[in-house]
Image (cartoon, rainbow, N blue to C red):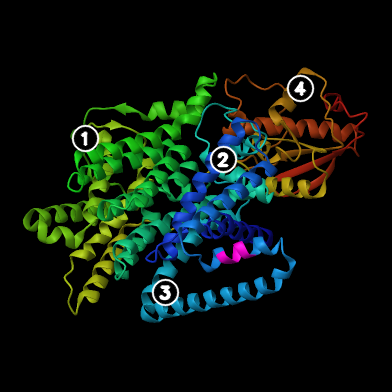
Amino acid sequence: MVTSWFVLLKIVLLIFLFLFAIPLSVQMWREKQDWKDRLLISIIHTHLFIILVVHMLVAVHLYETFSLIIVSIIAYIVILRNKTKKEIMSPSKKILLSFMQATDQKEFLIGWRKETLSNVTTRLKVLSKGIFKKISSHPFSILVILLLFFMSAAIRFYHSVIHYYYPSSDPYVHLKWVKLLGANKIYVDGVYPFGFEAIISAFHTITNIDPYYILRFLGPISTVFLVFTIYYVIRKHRPQDYSIAIFALLIYFISTFQFGFIWRQYSSLSMEYGIAFVLPAIYFFLEYMKEKRIQSFLLSLECFLLTVLIHPYAAICLFISYVVLFVFSLKYFSLLHLLKMVGGFAIAGIIGVLPLAVGLLSGIGFHGESIDFVQSSLNATEPSFRNFTMENFFGRTEYVHVLTFLCISLLMLVILLLFRKRVWSAIYPFQIYIAISCALFLFYKADWIGLPSLMLPYRIEVTLVLLTSISISSILVLIPKMKLTKIVSAVVIIGYVFLSYQTIPSYVLPIGNRLQYDESVEAYLKIKDEFSLQEWTIVSSIEEYPLVIDYGWHYNLTDFITNISKGEELKFPTKDVFLFVEKIPVGMNHKVTSANVTDFTLPARTEILDFYRLPEYRKMLHEKTWYWIEGVQEKHPNLLTVYLDTDRFTVYHIEQDVLNPYDVSKLWR
């Protein structure tokens, strides 16, 4: 547990350094841009830079630690020099340039140290005064917001801190791809967006942190950032009103127990990672509509490009949002200008799919499981209103959220129709968020109204709930400014919380989809720390394979039993061999026994994963493994030593002569 907290803190600090602190020093900022802008914009720029650089280096087979660092340093220096030519030198840039001079001029060091200390001290004083002033002016609001962030983070980090195993199957695949990407191997299992893998691989390449840890904690980190984007867009639209931000964050927190997506936010999943850029993309587009500043448009383009590079479903949800935004843009831009904007997005889209196109043109097909899943999700059905029921349409636990959103959307529409111009500017831009939410809701309920289904509903709801949380909170905008405004707002918020509380059947969080025990990951980490690199082999279920890549060797348990069954020679070329075997197979609640096992033959299966995913087949696999272990222990009592043993899991250690390894297929005979 202590190690988990230490590694988590280390990863958070390094992410802050690489994605925010370092990029911050070369950005050119406007006076109105506060810490929220600087944090978000730095993260956007850095993500795009890393993903593009990793793809380009892999394309020419030059991706490694040295090349990545050199390219990053060159880019940093070039950007820094260009920025200093265009603006008055800020203290941070002055410090950096002074340091560069100091490395060449020893006599400059003393002055540089004094100036650096003075600048840092001054900026810390200004920052602390600003924070104190803001807290003292809105102590209750800031306390509530911090509490909501803390609770949101606690829910998302709980699993990754308590458990070693990943709560879904996807991170195991991502871990494999990340490690192979480090060897300049991309699309090994088929063409698939690798933006997510590029970020993790680059972070691992520079820091040398085991990618297992990065994937274990990056999911919760990114989904807490997802929560931050809600806060960001509302505070930017209503900087003087904390109540709307509080309400939106509270709605999203409650949705954790209303919808089924929270288990996905425990995990490191590329779709959720891409969706983190959806709200910023919408906000910067709206800012461009309002202020006509090209930088805002380019930031929105960057976000769109990131979603294309990271996950197609995130890009589809953002594309639907852009369709709505372009409709509203007809009021602000000429047709020619809109066509130019469409051209910009088309170019961004082409850049985003270019790596996939190159992969396909090189003869590699799409990733089989992913393309099959996408194709199975795409369908057009007849409207099913004839079978309409309240529970099926509005959901069993989420109907308060859905009904509230629909009622507020209808209320906004009526008010806009009645008052139009007088109300439009007062509630702007929340009517646009509501319109985007309605568009996504139509696809969320596509099977009910006969629209083509672009993806399964549980995928759409991840983005939908972000936007509906903002849409529902917009009801506070309609409350007129008066002495009782805060009281009325509080009543509205409490009323929503009360209704939601009455309809949530359970506050127990889902545990996710466990594919291995914590002990198996602990054993891997222990072996990696205690034994020399690449000088050990783990024989186990398939889940350990992506963990072992780059550090040791792995042999699948199914292949192990098959070799023994056929009597084929099987020698491991490492001094230390570890056999992972389960007393209680994952997915079952009782111990296995080898009493009924008579041979090592496994039934024929078209999918090898059946022996790891289907409990009855996993049970059979481990029963035969125990049968082999008992036979070996009977004939060679001192060969197998217990390396780790728990009530449900055991690791056996075989130490052998590398020059004369055992033929394990003959040990049991």
- Categorize mark 2 by other alpha carbons within 10 Å: few (<14), some (14-19), many (20+): some
Amino acid at the residue labelled 1: Ile
Sequence-wise first label, 1 or 3: 3
- Which residue is denoted by mark 1 in the rendering? 449
Q: Measure the alpha-carbon separation of dots 1 and 2.
A: 44 Å
Mark 2, secondary structure of its residue? helix
Vertical placement of 650 versus 133: above or below? above
Query: Is the C terminus in the top left, top right, bottom left or bottom right quadrant?
Result: top right
Mark 1, secondary structure of its residue? helix
Sequence-wise first label, 1 or 2: 2
- Which residue is denoted by mark 4 in the rendering? 563
- Which residue is denoted by mark 2 in the rendering? 53
- Which residue is denoted by mark 3 in the rendering? 143
Q: Position of residue 120 (x, y in %)?
A: 58, 73
Sequence-wise first label, 1 or 4: 1
Please state which of the two labelled residues, at mark 1 or mark 2, is closer to the viewer. Answer: 2
Mark 3, secondary structure of its residue? helix
Q: Nearer the viewer, residue 350 or 80?
A: 80
Please state which of the two labelled residues, at mark 1 or mark 4, is closer to the viewer. Answer: 1
